[in-house]
Image: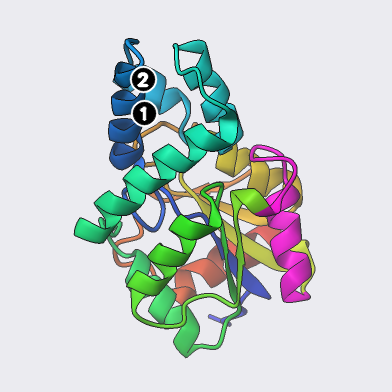
Amino acid sequence: MTTVMPAAVLWDMDGTIIDSEPYWMIAETALVQSWGGSWSDELGLSLVGMGLHTSAKVLQDHGVNLPSLEIIDILTTSVMEQVRRDVPWRPGARELLIELRELAVPTALVTMSFRSLADLVVESLGFSAFDVVVTGDDVELPKPHPEAYITAARELGVPIERCVAIEDSLPGVASAIASGAVTISVPHVVAVPPGDTHTTWLSLTGRTALDISVVYLGARS
């Protein structure tokens, strides 16, 4: 089989590279409860993949009387503290990133987390994993809007239609599809319905660059 790699592989972070969604829910619960409100796993799951300003508005609606940026800073600081104690890598993610780097395939991190958390995770990988990092504080419009993925492709200098994006959440998958990237969904804490607009993998465990090539060629044939 001919191995034709995409021009770049674009990676989501939370839920795709690291299993950080429980960390976000711990931070959200603590903050809402500190203001006398109540929070649930269901509410936390409803925010998976969304922009942090969207999350901040929901927390404000549940009693957190703080400006959006202050809420984001508190949540991000809490998640960073938890990540420093234990980086919860998703199975297969680091291995696939390493292979892509060995093959010199350009990569970008495309996350709605802010730069401080993204830089911590990138540093924790222990190798130069990404050519470009696009974060939630780099864009005006969060996922599910395609701005972040379009920005990543532009900064890499490649057509978005020749990129593959790897995502775990419904807003993230919608963002990647809308950008024009070939999209692989690897659902984790929230369901992403299968469909003909994207490829679904149950896990990154055992996945290789050849698997990405097969998906890319199948979508572009």
Q: Is residue 141 visible?
A: yes
State whether residue 197 is above or below residue 3: above
Residue 71 in the image, given as x and y percentages of width and height: 49, 32
Report the side of 132 relative to 59 (left or right): right
In the image, 9 versus 197, the foreground residue is 9
Which residue is at the far left? 85
Q: Residue at x 66, y 58 (%)?
A: 219
Give the crowd class for mark 1: few <14, some 14-19, many >=20 residues within 10 Å: many
Report the side of 118 relative to 146 (left or right): left
Would you say residue 152 sits in the magenta stretch?
yes
Q: What range of the chain is rendered magenta?
A: 138-157
Q: Residue at x 42, y 45 (%)?
A: 76
Residue 53 in the image, given as x and y percentages of width and height: 60, 33
What residue does disc 2 label? 32
Residue type at mark 2? Val
Q: CA distance from mark 2 to mark 1?
A: 6 Å
What residue does disc 1 label? 28
Label 1 sits on a secondary structure element that is helix
Residue 136 in the image, given as x and y percentages of width and height: 61, 48
